[in-house]
Amino acid sequence: MARTKKLTDPIYSPTNPTSEAAIRSQIDDSIQEVYDQSAKATDTVNLTGNQTIADVKTFSSSPIVPTPTTDFQVSTKKYVDDRELAIEADFNAKDAQNVKLTSNQTIAGVKTFSSSPIIPDPTAQNHGANKQYVDDTVANVVVGVIPDGTITDLKLSDGAGQVKARLLQAEQDIANISFPVSSVNTQTGDVVLSKTDIGLGNVDNLSATDIRSGTTKTDVGLSNVINELQFAQSNYGNISTRAASWTLILTDGNDVITVSTAAVITVPANATVAFPIGTAITFIRTGTGAVTLAPASGVTLLSKDTKRAIDGQYASATLIKTATDTWHLFGALA
């Protein structure tokens, strides 16, 4: 049909409503259904989009949520469990550093108490002692008993002034007490001791003349003195000769030693050869070879300009021990 046709009466068909009222009713129902669906859309939780849900909602199954990243988001069980374990571990670490009310602990470092701690009486040697225990113990300490009876059972529990006065008196009393020897080596009364009474019957004082003339004395326990005396006796003014390098020995002491060939003379440490302090040894270079003195480890050898070689044939130098490991060298040195 061409062009627009205006109908004055409604058109009806077998499948459509047969009256205008029925058609309007059907349209109204369709409109209401659209309105109802729109209302439901704003009252339900959608799969997407942001929404605010009011009132209490009870889930029959726990909802699955991601790990929270801000303060007010729902937390997962794992997030809570991990936080609990971390807090527990941190607590245990800090708790291990705390002093407990019970159980044994070792406390390190210096602890300063604002109030004195209360402790029981000690029962072992390494226990701390309380004031009452100390006071009770020192109150019965006897600090002075004088044999003549002037002061007896002086205790720290007496007044400080009284203790001081009695101690001063005790000091004076002790100064006045004599304790005579009742006997020495079966001798009684006023005893005059001889060298025999104290086990030195074989010991005599030796003069320099005795030593030079060969007088000797021996006695057990005086070996050091005897050695020095024998050393002095056997080495007084000897003249000896050397023809090679060597380390000084005890019998070289106080000798005049001629050296006929080139040689290095080593001065030993006191721990190796114990020359007496004051020992003097003179060296004469009789040959043409160089003669030099050298200190062993630990020895101090002092000489002018640190020269230690004897300066030419027929020149001489003297070595003197001035301390345990110190020697002085002087003479014709190069």
Image: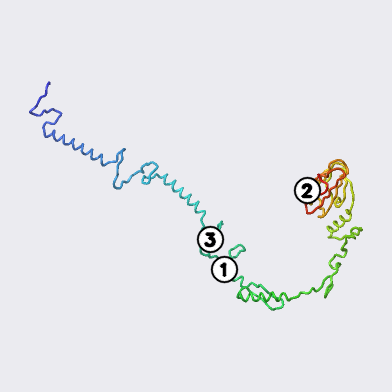
Quadrant of the image occupied by residue 184: bottom right
Identify the residue position indicated by label 2 in the image. 304
Ranked by sequence position, the earlier of labels 2 and 3 is 3
Disc 2 residue crowd, few under 14, some 14–19, many 20+, Cα 10 Å: few
Quadrant of the image occupied by residue 28: top left
| Element on which disc 2 rests | helix
Identify the residue position indicated by label 1 in the image. 131
Farthest left residue? 8
Q: Position of residue 50 (x, y in %)?
A: 31, 40
Closer to viewer: mark 3 or mark 1: 3
Closer to viewer: mark 2 or mark 3: 2
Question: Which residue is found at the position 10% from the left and 24% from the top?
Answer: 5
Q: Position of residue 53 (x, y in %)?
A: 29, 44
Please name the amino acid that badge 3 sits on.
Thr
Q: Is residue 114 above or below residue 257?
A: below
Split into 4 quadrants, where in the image is the C terminus? top right
Split into 4 quadrants, where in the image is the N terminus? top left
Query: Which residue is more in the foreground, 86 or 19?
Result: 86
